[in-house]
Amino acid sequence: MHRHLDTPLAAVRNLGILAHVDAGKTTLTERILYLTGTTHKRGEVHDGTTVTDFDPQERDRGITIFAAAVSCAWDAHRINLIDTPGHVDFSDEVARSLRVLDGAVAVFDAVAGVEPQSEAVWRQADRYGVPRIAFVNKLDRAGADLDTAVESIRERLHPAPLVVQLPIGSEAGFTGVVDLPRMRSLVWPEGRDTVEEGPVPEALRDAAEGRRRQLEEAVAELHPGALEEFCAEGTLSARTLTAALRDLTRSDDGVVVLCGSAYRNRGIEPLLDAVVAYLPSPRDVPAVRGTWDGGEQERFADPAAPFAALVFKVNGTATGRLTYLRVYSGTIGKGETVWDSGTGRTERIGRILRVQADHHAPLERAVAGDIVAVVGLKSARAGSTLCAPGAPLVLEPPTVADPVVSVAVEAVGSAEAELLVSALTRLVEEDPSLVVRTDPETGQLVLSGMGELHLEVAVEKIRLAQGLDVRVGRPRVAYRETVVRGVSGLVHRHVKQDGGAGEFAHVVLDVEPLEDVPGDGDGDGGATRFAFRSTVVGGRVPQEYVRALEAGCRDALADGPLGGHPVTGVRVVLTDGATHPKDSSERAFRTAGRFALREALRACAMVLLEPVADVTVTVPDDAVGGVLGDLAARRGQVSGSVARAGVVVITATVPLVELFGYATRLRSRTRGRGVFTARPAGYAPAPSTAASGTVTR
């Protein structure tokens, strides 16, 4: 294995493994570590012996919960790899990883093809501009079919899939692949971990030549250089084909598709070769852009440039606080100081560590392109920019989705209450998608997150790490209120005289719904959407008072008239107003805006909105009736069902509040064989009983 400092920047690959839960991401990561000599024993998810799923909860549940970074070497290249979660509740963990990666391997189940969370993480990679290659896994399973999986990639993800392999054998007889660019066979004999290279089997020669021709035509259609050679020669050389595939991958005009079986250790070597050949190095990606003092700056992946890094993960351990960085430019050594541009604080780097999941190797320094952990930072959070004190910069942090599910948490003993607050504070530092607040009405501590499992894992982490006995209340969801029929010409006059300077503001408002009210399928996540404009002319209301009035209206959106929930989807128009030469002020108009809009909302026709989720339920075909009935009882709107290989995949939209406890119910109805995934899909009108106050706030 090459030493860290000997690896040139062009020989570094920073990539993530992305997929739907149970597609085989962690098993693939384990096989990569084994083949590269990083580990000497193959870890298994079902045995709880994996390197990246090292957390006790991950091993107990058999799923990846926390993104884990590992580093290995292949063909004189260093590969920094992040195994990401596949469950929708931890999609923010995926987003934070994608923000700092240069490429990704998207893993698909050869039987299921593109699954809901596969699609979600693919869209996340699109958002961050991360080039990727596809690996169709589990070709040894009954019902596995590469062509069907590729077609689902084409239909649901809409890239141009460029299949570079042809399977040798099918299902249990899958033994290897034909490498189409080089027209050779790669076979993994039963019981052996090494690959045997040879000529294309005679029985597959015609099929391989046909597939190679299809690949050449697809590449020539997308790549001008390849088209020129294809027209001149009638074919493409292996060198031209490889170069064109690299260009198409990095420009996101096509996605290279490989296949194999990670569990049986088949197809891993060519996948690693593809990572090296097609995915970009830090030097190949555009310079990172940041801002400072109102201007935009670029930082290239140059070890000699000023230091700039982005924190993407913070993890508290028994030995101290680990801060995970992606270094974009410059070089940093242990003992040096960095500047946190968000807090304005200077901090000292105590140690720099090469990460191997829960094991770490010390480094003297980190350079542009590195993904490392550092010890010694006290205030840096996920999304913080660290830079050289003399070259300030702010990099765009990963986006954080609004939490939609909440639970009330409290310590069993009063003596532990302070410890619980401290533990929750550390938890939020590590996971920005968690939010802790104190309910002003009940005084309860409320923990909010992205789903029921997300909160369950967070609470269990406190119990395991801190030894605290924590009580948890029923999960609660974040409701919204919106206007369905507005009011016109509402007059509000704010006058206050109590000695000294008085307050005066006179306003006339129209209140109406926004055209794209949440709940129409826009999936806005429930963000407060508000529009304000003034049609007053002639200077009757000065502009600074208009701005104050708008601020007051925004204040009023915090508590709606139906149940005190935030109000969204509202447009307010100031149509008239009046001022007093002495008593009018920005404060008076802000107060008037707050009370005027509250009065207007009470006069409007309002509706309560509840968060809904797109649910995909996979059940045996003999249990479909019971599952459909249960979804109907949960107010689910079924949008479709597809039968395949003895199972039925049902898609529906279900209110999030109705999904609590659904996993247990589904398992009981299907004798443990049913699975489901859900992802937030915006807001929809709640039933009238909710508006009358029966819904828990």
Image (cartoon, rainbow, N blue to C red):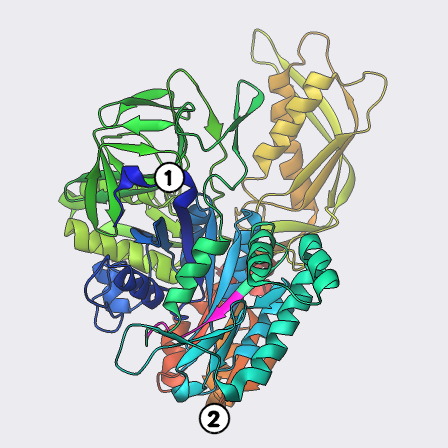
Q: From the viewer's side, name the closer residue of 381 and 490.
A: 381
Q: Secondary structure at mark 1?
A: loop
Task: Give the magenta-colored segment's residue range.
Answer: 257-263
339 vs 58: above or below: above
Q: What residue sits right under mark 2 in the picture?
A: 622
Farthest-out residue, bottom: 622
For label 1, the crowd category at 10 Å Cα-Cα, with few meaning under 14, some 14 to 19 and many 20 or more, is: few
x, y percentage for residue 111? 48, 80
Residue 347 falls in which quadrant of the image? Answer: top left
Check disc 1 and give the amino acid type.
Pro
Tell me if I can see residue 697 in this picture. Answer: no
Towards the viewer: 423 or 17: 17
Q: Position of residue 689 (x, y in %)?
A: 56, 64
From what the image shows, is residue 502 above or below residue 26? above
Q: Is residue 193 left or right of residue 536?
A: left
Side of 308 where 479 appears, left or right:
right
Circle 1 is placed at which residue position? 8
Residue occupying the far right of the picture: 538
Residue 128, position in %: x, y? 54, 46
Q: Position of residue 146 (x, y in %)?
A: 52, 78
Q: Image height check: is 372 above or below 294?
A: below
Residue type at mark 2 is Asp
User: Looking at the rendering, which quadrant does residue 338 occupy?
Assistant: top left
